[in-house]
């Protein structure tokens, strides 16, 4: 895809029928880590089942309905290729803060999809939260550039927060965006 024309994509709310694509995207990321340990997302070591993913998606859709999450997906040719979610903190004292996560399939990165997902999610989040936070791997320069361009600021770094494999030590950079 990188050498081809940028695909036309749609950013929209998620639906139950996205389940297989979301699971496929997640499993692709797990495989990608094996060949590229520098992929900028922490994943659980266990391969999720369709049953577990269905439960996860149902819970996420319930959170959206209750106003405890903002989620957008990007669709290309009828398939979900990326997702951005902002979920509420669990503590009532921190309910004004959302935590952002984003995932875009490898072959669709650097095409504006991540930016569009984040812009859409952040626009919706302004109505629910006064602050958004996220974590990013220290070596993920592209993601950090995007986050800074969207107004996020670094508030801390936790050295060697993750150890991937036996040798790769990864710093966690913590960033936030405060809405005016």
Image (cartoon, rainbow, N blue to C red):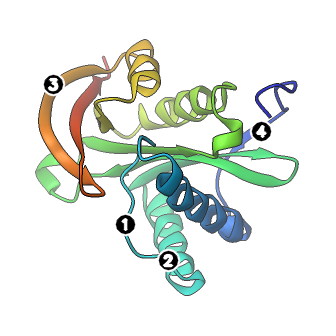
User: Do we see residue 5 in this rendering?
Assistant: yes
Please report whichever mark, 3 or 4, sits nearer to the chain's N-terminal start. 4
The N terminus sits in image quarter:
top right
Q: Which residue is mark 4?
A: 10
Mark sitting earlier along the chain (1/4): 4
Contact (Cβ within 8 Å) of mark 2 with mark 3: no
Q: Which residue shows up at 41% across the image and 75% down it? A: 46
Name the image quarter holding residue 7. top right
C-alpha distance separating marks 1 and 4? 28 Å
| Front-lying residue, 87 or 68 | 87
Residue located beneath label 3 in the image: 155
Single out the mark in the foreground, 1 or 3. Answer: 1
Q: Earlier in the sequence, mark 4 or mark 2?
A: 4
Kind of element beneath mark 4: strand
- Left or right of residue 135: residue 9: right
- Residue designated by label 1: 44
| Contact, mark 4 vs mark 2 (Cβ under 8 Å) | no
Residue 48: x and y, percent?
49, 77
Report if the CB atoms under discs 2 and 1 are less than 8 Å apart: yes
Check residue 93 in the rendering and tell me which mark sits there, or answer none.
Answer: none
Query: Circle 3 sits in a helix, a strand or a loop, which is it?
Result: strand
Q: Of marks 2 and 3, which one's residue comes earlier in the chain?
A: 2
Instruction: List the residue tagged with mark 2.
Output: 48
Q: Nearer the viewer, mark 2 or mark 3?
A: 2
Real-space Cα separation, disc 2 to disc 3, in angstroms? 32 Å
């Amino acid at each position: 895809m990188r050498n081809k024309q940028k695909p036309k994509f749609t950013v929209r709310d998620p639906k139950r029928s996205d389940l297989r694509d979301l699971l496929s995207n997640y499993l692709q990321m797990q495989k990608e880590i094996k060949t590229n340990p520098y992929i900028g997302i922490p994943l659980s070591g266990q391969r999720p089942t369709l049953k577990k993913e269905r439960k996860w998606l149902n819970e996420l859709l319930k959170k959206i309905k209750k106003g405890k999450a903002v989620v957008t997906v990007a669709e290309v040719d009828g398939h979900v290729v990326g997702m951005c979610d902002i979920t509420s903190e669990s503590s009532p004292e921190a309910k004004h803060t959302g935590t952002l996560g984003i995932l875009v399939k490898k072959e669709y990165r650097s095409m504006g999809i991540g930016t569009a997902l984040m812009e859409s999610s952040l626009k919706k989040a302004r109505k629910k939260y006064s602050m958004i936070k996220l974590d990013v791997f220290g070596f993920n320069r592209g993601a950090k550039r995007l986050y800074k361009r969207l107004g996020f600021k670094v508030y801390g770094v936790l050295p060697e927060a993750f150890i991937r494999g036996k040798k790769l030590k990864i710093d966690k950079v913590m960033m936030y965006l405060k809405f005016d």
